[in-house]
Image (spheres, helix red, strand yellow):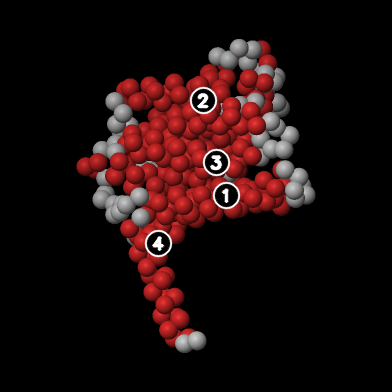
């Protein structure tokens, strides 16, 4: 076989793939985000179902699956915009400047909305078991741990760092947000087959039918809230990560303090609170979510 000819064909094929990805940046990003995360999720899923033995290693690998969107975003930034695009993303990661009211909303308002969503459920308040010792010390520690080691950092560089600006430029704020919400929801789909989303071998299929629709409504509400905050804080990816961390930290630390199954068995309390907030945002902004196309830098969006 002619080695030189094979090398030329390989190089040509690589360039053709890169060109196709440049022309279809959103499709390429979401395909890779799904593929990376779903593949990494397989060992934990098999372990949860007893096909593989229980091992700490699988849990650690499972935590890494949240970085699929970030890896996909890095690849697409380098392909579509080169080194400059990734450097621009890094500057948005360091963009801490935002009005103090946004920090109050994220750190206190989001937990308050989630708490209210819990307390309106029948029997929820009576099932509260009280704050554990050193809760106020543990909470910020867990916040930092979740910020860097969980979904916030791993997901938001992709969802809000790469995808949302391009989708808003192409579809407008509301349509882009709803589409991103759907794709964000179903990116989590394998988790519903594991204990991470109250699934797994010991659960019945009806739990999947109940939990997934509730989770869908929750994520759609969060997508609206995230876009609204993102557009009002200059497209700061740091603020998006902070918002994600606030939601995840409160959910993982406060939800277990209630014993009522209506609170602990699904995402219903969080869906209620955030849906009310999202609807209020939609009404007050008339669906614009703070998006101002004339102030946005043009993006080479290509086809989805």
Mark found first going from the N terminus, 2 or 3: 3
Mark 4 and mark 1: span between their CA atoms?
23 Å
Task: Choose top left, top right, bottom left or bottom right for residue 209.
Answer: top right
Marks 4 & 2, CB-CB < 8 Å contact = no
Residue 236, given in percent of the width and then of the height, sits at: 39, 43
Q: In this view, does 230 lie to the left or right of 261?
A: left
Marks 4 & 3, CB-CB < 8 Å contact = no
**Crowdedness near tag 1: few (<14), some (14–19) or many (≥20) residues, C-alpha within 10 Å:** many
Please report the residue visible at 43 percent of the width from the left and 84 percent of the height from the top.
Answer: 5
Q: Is residue 268 above or below residue 242?
A: above
Residue furthest toward the left? 294
Residue placed most toward the observer, 185 or 91: 185
Mark found first going from the N terminus, 4 or 3: 4
The residue to which callout 1 is attached is 38
Residue placed most toward the observer, 266 or 91: 266
**Crowdedness near tag 2: few (<14), some (14–19) or many (≥20) residues, C-alpha within 10 Å:** many
Mark 2 and mark 1: span between their CA atoms?
25 Å
Residue 252, given in percent of the width and then of the height, sits at: 62, 33
């Amino acid at each position: 076989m002619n080695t030189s000819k094979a090398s030329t064909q390989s190089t040509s094929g690589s360039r053709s793939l890169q060109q196709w990805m440049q022309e279809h940046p959103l499709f390429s990003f979401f395909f890779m985000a799904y593929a990376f995360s779903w593949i990494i999720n397989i060992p934990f899923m098999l372990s949860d179902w007893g096909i593989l033995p229980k091992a700490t290693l699988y849990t650690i690998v499972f935590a890494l699956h949240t970085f699929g969107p970030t890896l996909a975003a890095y690849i697409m930034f380098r392909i579509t915009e080169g080194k400059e695009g990734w450097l621009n993303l890094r500057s948005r990661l360091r963009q801490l400047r935002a009005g103090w009211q946004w920090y109050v909303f994220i750190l206190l308002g989001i937990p308050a909305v989630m708490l209210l969503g819990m307390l309106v459920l029948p029997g929820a308040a009576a099932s509260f078991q009280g704050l554990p010792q050193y809760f106020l010390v543990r909470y910020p520690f867990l916040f930092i741990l979740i910020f860097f080691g969980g979904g916030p950092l791993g997901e938001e560089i992709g969802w809000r760092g790469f995808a949302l600006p391009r989708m808003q430029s192409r579809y407008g704020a509301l349509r882009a947000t709803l589409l991103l919400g759907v794709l964000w929801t179903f990116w989590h789909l394998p988790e519903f087959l594991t204990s991470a989303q109250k699934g797994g071998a010991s659960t019945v299929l009806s739990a999947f039918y109940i939990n997934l629709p509730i989770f869908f409504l929750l994520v759609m509400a969060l997508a609206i809230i995230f876009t609204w905050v993102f557009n009002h804080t200059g497209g700061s990816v740091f603020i998006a990560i902070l918002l994600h961390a606030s939601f995840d930290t409160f959910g993982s630390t406060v939800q277990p303090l209630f014993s009522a199954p209506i609170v602990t068995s699904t995402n219903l309390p969080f869906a209620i609170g955030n849906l009310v907030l999202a609807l209020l945002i939609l009404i007050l902004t008339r669906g614009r979510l703070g998006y101002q196309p004339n102030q946005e830098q043009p993006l080479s969006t290509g086809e989805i």
